[in-house]
Amino acid sequence: MSGFLKYLKAAFLYHWNLLMLGSTGAFGIISGYPDVVLPLAAAAEMVYLALLSSNPRFQKIVDAKEIMGHKTGRDEVSSKTVTRILNELNPADRKRFGHLQGLCQKLSSVADVVNGQVNTGAQGITDMQIGNINRLLWIYLKLLYSKKSLENYFATIDEKEIREKMNGIQERLDSLGNEAEDTPTEVKYRRSLADTYNTYEMRLKNYSDAKGNYDFIQLELERLYSKIAGIAETGISRQDPQYVSNEIDIVSSS
């Protein structure tokens, strides 16, 4: 469900509204004047629904609850996934993530302060923005996992050995002489050697691409860590929720 009908339904199902509807209906019947009370209650209900469902603040709350509702079914899986990833990281990366996570958790105190400031005009840190911080932390954790996966891959590759084997195959190919004069047996040998050479060449290319990706991941990890830590540290020191909100939105959008 989307648009105005979604907000209208949420306003109608609001527990206080249902309570008032039930109370008003009961009062109308008990009073002996249902033909007067019930139409007035219906008119008041229509005004209430129109005002609340069109209220921007109420709409944001409904949207946030909808997002959280979609996430609920994935919470247990996500928790298990995060635990598994953290257990596979090396101690240094695990410690770095823990420090960053700790900084972000302190932002909740900023949000709590703002939530207590009624009618001050401060927008504060919304649940959705806290969710964006968590999303950035999740991206950072996945980058750490990708870094670990590439390190595991590099541990299985010996670039020097591959090049030595390629040189050996090339020497055997050269020893076969002129390809045009190959015998049927030599044709099979040459084809097999050429295929092996191409396979090693592809492995070297994959290794080179992986190194490029690894270097890029390192840069992204540094950039993202600085961004998240900067937002958290500045928000905590300034107690400036508007600054934090703006920075979260900027980093999340990028």
Image (cartoon, rainbow, N blue to C red):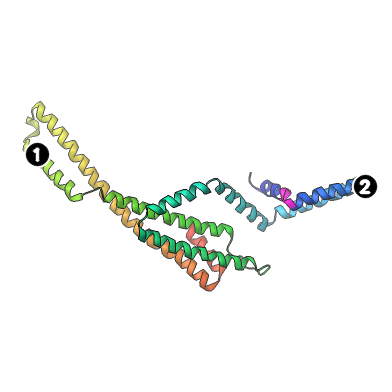
Q: Which residue is mark 2?
A: 33
Label 1 with label 2: CB-CB less than 8 Å: no
Image quadrant holding the N terminus, namely top right
Q: Who is closer to the viewer here, 216 or 162?
A: 162
Is there any visible trace of residue 254 in the rendered image? no
Q: Residue at x 10, y 27 (%)?
A: 185
Q: Residue at x 56, y 48 (%)?
A: 72
Amino acid type assigned to the residue bearing label 2 in the image: Tyr
With respect to residue 5, does 231 lie above or below?
below
> Few, some or many C-alpha atoms within 10 Å of disc 1 (few <14, some 14-19, many ≥20)?
some
Query: Residue 151, percent across and down?
Result: 30, 53
Residue that lies at the very extreme toward the bottom in this rendered image: 238
Amino acid type assigned to the residue bearing label 1 in the image: Arg
With respect to residue 205, does 112 lie above or below?
below
Tell me which label, 1 or 2, sits earlier in the chain: 2
Looking at the image, is mark 1 or mark 2 nearer the viewer? 2
Q: Which residues are magenta?
A: 11-15
| Lateral position of residue 187 relative to residue 126, left or right | left
Q: Who is closer to the viewer here, 50 or 100?
A: 100
Query: Residue 99, percent across and down?
Result: 43, 64
Circle 2 — which element? Answer: loop
Is there any visible trace of residue 17 in the rendered image? yes
The answer to whether residue 13 is magenta is yes
Q: Which residue is mark 1?
A: 172
| Lateral position of residue 235 relative to residue 147, left or right | right
**Tag shown at residue 26:** none
Query: Residue 184, percent across and down?
Result: 10, 26
